[in-house]
Image: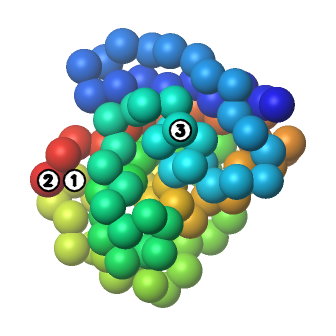
């Protein structure tokens, strides 16, 4: 297992042990973080929106066109915006720092 450092919507930091081989969203959802993840990881909503810390953006891979389309509809989209369902959690992401995005 690898760690994920999370800042919640209230600005509080916490750390969880992430399971390698599942998505970032599944790790957050399984640890009861503030994500609705309504579509269950199908990239058809944006209820698992997170901000990837600047020094981790390149390591999480490129956004797909489909992911970009959903994110561009959000007022709170930023450079580090990702749908956590589209980020596979790998050993290379040990120590990943994210912030849960505002609820829209």
Q: Around disc 2, counting alpha carbons within 10 Å, would you say few (fewer than 14), some (14 to 19), or many (20 or more)? A: few
Kind of element beneath mark 1: loop
| In the image: residue 36, left or right of residue 64 | left
Q: Is residue 75 above or below residue 54?
A: below
| In the image: residue 99, left or right of residue 52 | left
Q: Are marks 2 and 1 in contact (CB under 8 Å)?
A: yes
Kind of element beneath mark 3: helix
Mark nearer the viewer, 1 or 3: 3
Residue indicated by mark 2: 104
The alpha-carbon separation of the residues under discs 2 and 1 comes to 8 Å
Q: Are marks 2 and 3 in contact (CB under 8 Å)?
A: no
The mark that comes first in sequence, 1 or 3, is: 3
Residue indicated by mark 3: 30
The alpha-carbon separation of the residues under discs 1 and 3 comes to 25 Å
Residue 74 in view (yes/no):
yes
| In the image: residue 75, left or right of residue 60 | left
Residue 58 falls in image quadrant: bottom right
Mark nearer the viewer, 2 or 3: 3
Q: Could you say which disc has been placed on residue 76 in the image?
A: 1
Q: Around disc 3, counting alpha carbons within 10 Å, would you say few (fewer than 14), some (14 to 19), or many (20 or more)? A: few
Q: Nearer the viewer, residue 72 or 39?
A: 39
Q: Is residue 37 above or below residue 5?
A: below
Q: Going 32% across and 61% down the picture, which residue do you hit? A: 38
Expressed as whole percent of the image width and height from the top left, the position of residue 100 reads: 37, 38
Mark nearer the viewer, 2 or 1: 2
Q: Quadrant of the N terminus?
A: top right
The alpha-carbon separation of the residues under discs 2 and 3 comes to 22 Å
Q: Nearer the viewer, residue 74 or 22?
A: 22
């Amino acid at each position: 297992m690898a760690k994920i450092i999370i800042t919640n919507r209230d600005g509080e930091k916490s750390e969880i042990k992430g399971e390698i081989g599942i998505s970032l969203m599944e790790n957050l959802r399984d640890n009861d973080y503030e994500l609705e993840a309504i579509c269950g990881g199908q990239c058809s909503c944006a209820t698992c929106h997170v901000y990837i810390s600047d020094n981790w953006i390149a390591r999480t891979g490129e956004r797909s066109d489909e992911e970009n389309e959903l994110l561009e509809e959000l007022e709170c989209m930023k450079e580090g915006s990702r749908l956590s369902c589209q980020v596979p959690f790998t050993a290379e992401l040990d120590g990943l720092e994210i912030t849960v995005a505002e609820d829209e």
